[in-house]
Amino acid sequence: MNVSVRHDLERQRFFAIVEGQESYLDYGIVDDDTLEYRRTYSAPELRGRGIAAEVVRVALDWANAEGKKVIPSCRFVRDRMDRGTPR
């Protein structure tokens, strides 16, 4: 599935709209070098399709490109990082 993930800097959210429903990752800025990835969500009918995983991948790629460390407070993000998704 090709998922278009967008980044809303103001809301501190990465998100994708699929079938009219939003899947997202919310984050916070800890300091100049560190982000806290706090929460992911996908509507139940979208789960298991890799949408949240793609949102997290894009968010981790962005943090890596920006030279930021990530604190994975969200279990789903922590699991993705443990699987070797780029930080």
Image: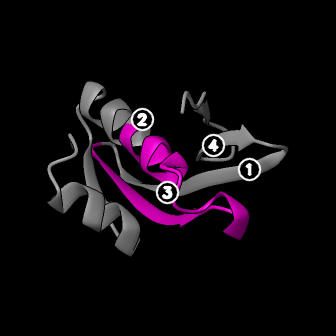
Residue 46 pos. (x, y %): 66, 57
Asked if the residues shown at circle 4 and circle 1 are in contact, with their CB atoms under 8 angstroms apart, the answer is yes
Identify residue for label 2: 58
Which residue, given by chain and number where applicable, does mark 1 sit on?
22
State the residue at coordinates (74%, 50%). 22
Q: Which stretch is magenta?
A: 33-57
Q: Position of residue 86 (x, y in %)?
A: 20, 40
Q: Nearer the viewer, residue 46 or 30?
A: 46
Mark 1 is surrounded, within 10 Å at the Cα level, by few (under 14), some (14 to 19) or many (20 or more) other residues, namely some
N-term-proximal mark, 1 vs 2: 1
Q: Which of marks 4 and 2 precedes in the sequence?
A: 4
Tell me if residue 20 comes above or below residue 83 in the rendering.
above
In the picture of the structure, the residue carrying the numbered disc 4 is 15
Identify the element where label 1 is drawn.
strand
The amino acid type found where label 1 is placed reads Glu
Is 31 left, or right, of 20 in this rendering? left
Q: From mark 1 to mark 3, how far is it between C-alphas?
A: 19 Å
- Choose mark 3 or mark 2, whichever is in front: 2
Q: CA distance from mark 1 to mark 2?
A: 15 Å
Question: For mark 3, does the 10 Å Cα neighbourhood hold few (<14), some (14 to 19), or many (20 or more) residues?
Answer: some
For label 2, the crowd category at 10 Å Cα-Cα, with few meaning under 14, some 14 to 19 and many 20 or more, is many
Furthest toward the right, the residue is 20
The residue type indicated by label 4 comes to Phe
Q: Which mark is residue 28?
A: 3
